[in-house]
Amino acid sequence: MSAQNPLFIPGPTNIPDRIRKACDMQTIDHRSPAFARVFKPAIAGVKRVLGMGAGEVFIFPSTGTGGWEAAVSNTLSPGDTLLAARFGMFSHRWIDLCQRHGLNVQVIEAPWGQGAPLAAIEAALRADTGHAIRVVLATHNETATGVRSDIAGIRRALDAAGHPALLFVDGVSSIGSMPFDMAGWGVDVAVAGSQKGFMLPAGLAILGVSPKALAAIETATLPRTFFDFRDMAKAYVAGGYPYTPAVGLIAGLAEAVEMLEEEGLEAVYARHHRLAEGVRRAVAAWGMRPCAASADLYSDTVTAVLVPEGCNGTDLVRLAADKYRVAFGVGLGEVAGRVFRIGHLGSLTDVMVLAGLATAEMCMADLGWPVRLGSGVAAAQEFYRGSVPAMLAAAA
Ligand SMILES: *Cc1c(COP(=O)(O)O)cnc(C)c1O
């Protein structure tokens, strides 16, 4: 890939120079007060981005997958029951991780392209009169299909059923890019990673943990060492870590939060929505449609584009990489070949997105797909011209 071309995979995302520079630092002694000066702003910043009330943020040298493992291994015991819907590769992988930990996952299967099925979740919770279900898992943004689920709706289902289960949310590809309201939605564990909305290299699992989830640790017996929240909490009190932290990445995380807050979180979310809407206009102009089944499910961070009959989305991704040095996402699992994915999250502008759309069109033309060059780009251009944020327009 050319280092100049932006990436259009839904993570890892483009790394702004400010963040690269913040990560690039000389070694410090992580057991000295210098570390707390790097670390504390990062923790405080993540709390704001998550919209957390009381509770703790834990940052592990790991990735989002490690965050899933930390969430369940700290709060559950072998044989415990969870409730989860499966509607894409990422919801599937969290379920698989739980099963491999000896947990009993009650799985609600939903078609890929749909979101978390609220009525079925509420029905399952109501049917569980003995309250065997300890945790409900939810994938906020299913990155494989470009579907955003209604986490507030899952909270309402729990409340309507009067069910005490904890609510764990995978926000790896939404947090920092789409509204996330941990306190308002009553989320007990929120999982994020460094390499998506936070615009950093991969290497951190970032978790927000509610007091209710922290209390569950005391009775949970799944084995855990590296990911033990209690060791982390104990070390935090002294301003440190139970082992060697990824200091550069943590410095970068503090910078990332500063960038998000300088822009303003609401403006960041509005930017993602606007970029995504331009992509969706382009997809419609190509005569195609998103894998997400309806507009209320559209993700503002990734669009999985269903390709025409007889075409293969993976061909487009390969050609874009080989010929134009631009990265798009391949289809995963059930939708392998049937979609290609345009990531539109992180450090990205309308102008960058137009370059990605233009590249996708060149590939379609090269592959003989029935798409006219410029059609999607023009649709996105029309949308972007007419929707410049007031702040930018005023500066012009
Ligand atoms: C990227 C992603 C993950 C996993 O992240 P890794 O950092 O690769 O472990 C989990 N869930 C979702 C929704 C993702 O997009």
Image (cartoon, rainbow, N blue to C red):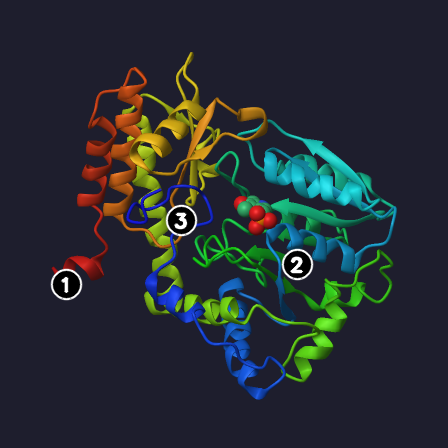
Question: Which residue is at 46% across, 31% downward?
Answer: 294
* Apparent side of residue 212 relative to residue 390 in the rendered image (left or right): right
Q: Is residue 295 left or right of residue 370?
A: right
Q: Residue 326: give x, y in percent of width and height.
A: 34, 38
Distance (Cα) linking label 3 and label 2: 23 Å
> Where is mark 1, residue-wise?
395
Between the residue at mark 2 and the residue at mark 1, the CA separation in whole angstroms equals 41 Å
Q: Is residue 78 visible?
A: yes
SS for callout 2: strand
Q: Residue furthest top?
A: 310
Label 1: element kind: helix
Q: Nearer the viewer, residue 113 or 371?
A: 371
Q: Nearer the viewer, residue 85 or 333?
A: 333
Horizontal side, residue 131 vs residue 378: left or right: right
Q: Is residue 79 left or right of residue 207?
A: right
> How busy is the neighbourhood of tag 1: few (under 14 within 10 Å), some, or many (20 plus)?
few
Image location of residue 4, percent across then percent down: 28, 49
Q: Amino acid at mark 2?
A: Val
Q: Which is nearer the N-term, disc 3 or disc 2?
A: 2
Q: Which mark is residue 345?
A: 3
Please give the residue where the numbered disc 2 appears in the rendered image: 189
- Mark 3 / mark 1, whichever is N-terminal: 3
Please, what is the three-letter code of the amino acid marked with disc 3?
Leu
Look at the picture and state if 16 lies above or below 310. below
Report the Cα–Cα distance between label 3 and label 1.
24 Å
